[in-house]
Amino acid sequence: MINDFIYDIPVRIYFGRDQLKHLGAELKKYGTRVLMTYGGGSIKKMGLYDRVVKETKEAGLELFELSGIEPNPRIDSVRKGAKMCKEHHIDVLLAVGGGSTIDATKIMAAGACVDHDPWDFLDLSKRVPIERALPIVSILTLSATGSEMDTAAVISNPETNDKIGRLDDILSHLFEVYFNMDQDLYMLDCFMEGLMKTVIRYTPIAMREPDNYEARANLMWASSWAINGFVNGGKRKAWSCHPMEHELSAFYDITHGLGLAILTPRWMEYCLDETTVSKYVQFGTNVFGIDPTLPPMDIARQAIDKLSDFLFNTLQLKRTFPEVGIDRTHFGVMAKKAVSGGTLPGFKPLQQADVERIFEMCMTA
């Protein structure tokens, strides 16, 4: 039976060349006092910072700045932003950057409207509801997390070694939904397969030709649609790789996408059995063009191999935990937190021991 669902995404997208000309008018809809958030300064090197300042000044807006948002955004940056919003009576926040900057800005926007610590929105022991937030406008500089077009945000707290999401690359977001044995709309699987093929086709081009507009545009739009809720349909299964990776980057502060790349093929290998093989066959034949007349298990293993080849050879990503500084020290505690002390009811239900085995698989090539 296909589950019912509600899909609501009130986001206006300006997509294409020279869309920054709309920035001032969009910001002005919400007021005149703007807090711009960004990361380590790459927006200044690329000239984007100067353009943003120009557009806001020409629109008669007062601009405040918060820089230094971390790649794994930390709660201290969120607290600082929420405090600035209150002190300067900010009307609207402008996030300029990738998913980390946008994620942090979302929680700042909510934190600006309450008296309690913004971490209370994320703390699993409190989980204070978000009832109000300042408006957010974003300028996306990185195609990965889809944060520009969804309701999610993931924040790290180094004090507690927690990395928690509030509802969090392109391929990982699709895999978490696609690898699911629930019956759902056929067209959604086709849509996800099309997005996967887009990523596999255009990522190598973007790496070879950084200025290739067609490749960048396709990847940016694919990243937005990978996690804006559309592909979820009526699926109810929990995500698997993201909870595991959040523990890795909470303890070791590695890049989220890199952690997912190392984990995903091993998770797929671990979950493969006679009850799940049909999904691997669908993936392998429709996305990688594997011969559908081969035995199902052969197709499944070839699909995992082809994905690994794409991640570790084509994209040249690190393929093992030791290569990114992860050892076995925290496997037990990370696995326990990933399953919340019980069972992670994903594509294939995982308990602490299962997650520890997957972590162990990531220790060698």
Image (cartoon, rainbow, N blue to C red):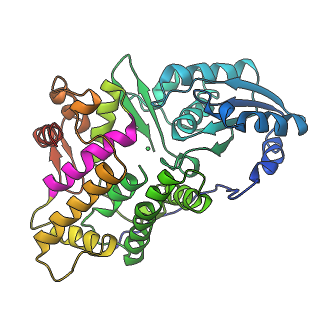
Can residue 42 be seen by looking at this rendering?
yes
Magenta-tinted stretch: 255-271
In-image side of 38 versus 56 (left or right) = left
Query: Could you say which quadrant of the image residue 351 lies in?
Result: top left
Q: Position of residue 207 (x, y in %)?
A: 48, 51
Which residue is farthest bottom? 293
Marker count (numbered): 0
Residue occupying image coordinates x 42% and y 38%: 165
Judge left or right: residue 314 versus residue 362: right
The location of residue 104, given as percent across then percent down, is 54, 32
Q: Position of residue 296 (x, y in %)?
A: 13, 74
Q: Quadrant of residue 213?
A: bottom right
Q: Quadrant of the C terminus?
A: top left
Q: Is residue 48 magenta?
A: no
Judge whether residue 265 is colored magenta.
yes
Q: Residue at x 55, y 25 (%)?
A: 78
- Answer above or below: position of 104 versus 228: above
The N terminus sits in image quarter: bottom left
Q: Is residue 337 above or below residue 176?
A: above
Residue 132 shows up from this direction: no
Identify the image quadrant of residue 138: top right
> In the rendering, at what x and y percent does residue 24 appear?
82, 43
Q: Main secondary structure of the magenta part?
A: helix
Q: Return the residue nearer the eye: 7 or 18.
A: 18
Residue found at x 23% / y 34%: 321
Q: Is residue 251 left or right of residue 41?
A: left
Q: What's the residue at 15%, 27% (across, down)?
A: 328
